[in-house]
Amino acid sequence: MSIFPITIYGDKILRNIAEPVKQVNDEMIFNIQSMFETMRNADGIGLAANQVGLKDKYFIIDLQPVEGYEKMKPLIMINPEIIEESEEQIIMDEGCLSLPRLRAEIERPKIIKVRYIDTDEKEQEIEADNLFARVILHEYDHLIGKMIPDRVESEIKKQMQNDLLRIMKREVDVDYPITEK
Ligand code: ZN
């Protein structure tokens, strides 16, 4: 296993549409294990493949550090699709390892259904709500090239511009390895 540098807002791969995984092979398992190490080292609870420079369509989630989710198993969602979203929306504060120090309130569906394949290439379908749904939707966004600034109103995005520039220039304190400019 190894710790990957995390891609930062402005890195082109964060705008790419991820490529569906055809087969779960040893290289991918190694990458997934390294992603867990990378995420935990950065105190994250979700990480998409393009956040470590990989083009594949999958992400990992581990909510165990969060109060109330201690017993939840870490998850790997390969080729995920959001198949249902509740009409009810909730606002939650979000951060992103590719946007160090930035936080924003974002409105998203409270409950979702997601279909994905696991590392045994078995199809899974689960319902998720609240924080769990939130993390899935945030990570799913990464796989379609979207990030927090794309999910806020234009007025808020304007207010973010200076912070975004500082992040792109790496003029922000980060205590985990990130990509070079
Ligand atoms: Zn993110």
Image (cartoon, rainbow, N blue to C red):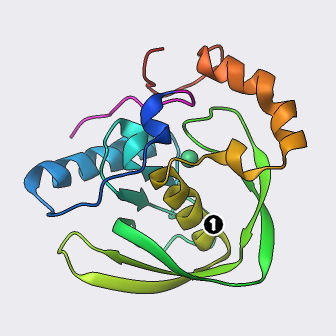
The residue lying furthest to the left in this view is: 26
Q: Is residue 155 visible?
A: yes
Q: Position of residue 156 (x, y in %)?
A: 86, 41
The residue lying furthest to the right in this view is: 155
Crowding at mark 1 (Cα within 10 Å: few <14, some 14-19, many 20+): many
Residue at 50% over, 50% down: 142
Residue 33 vs 51, above or below: the answer is below
Helix, strand or loop under label 1: helix
Q: In the image, 90: left or right of 116?
A: right
Q: Is residue 72 visible?
A: no
> Mark 1 is on which residue type?
Arg
The quadrant holding residue 162 is top right
Label 1 C-beta lies within 8 Å of the nearest ligand 1 atom: no
Residue for badge 1: 134
User: How many numbered marks have been drawn onto this rendered protein structure?
Assistant: 1
Q: Is residue 137 magenta?
A: no
Q: In the image, 111: left or right of 62?
A: right
Residue 94 vs 82, above or below: the answer is above
Q: Position of residue 32 (x, y in %)?
A: 27, 52
Magenta span: chief secondary structure: loop
Q: Position of residue 139 (x, y in %)?
A: 51, 57
Say which of 73 and 23 sits in front.
23
Residue at 14% over, 63% down: 23
Q: Position of residue 90 (x, y in %)?
A: 79, 71
Q: State which region is magenta.
A: 1-10
* Quadrant, the N terminus: top left
Residue at 33% over, 67% down: 79
Say which of 170 and 42 sits in front.
170
Say which of 166 and 10 sits in front.
10
Say which of 44 and 68 sits in front.
44
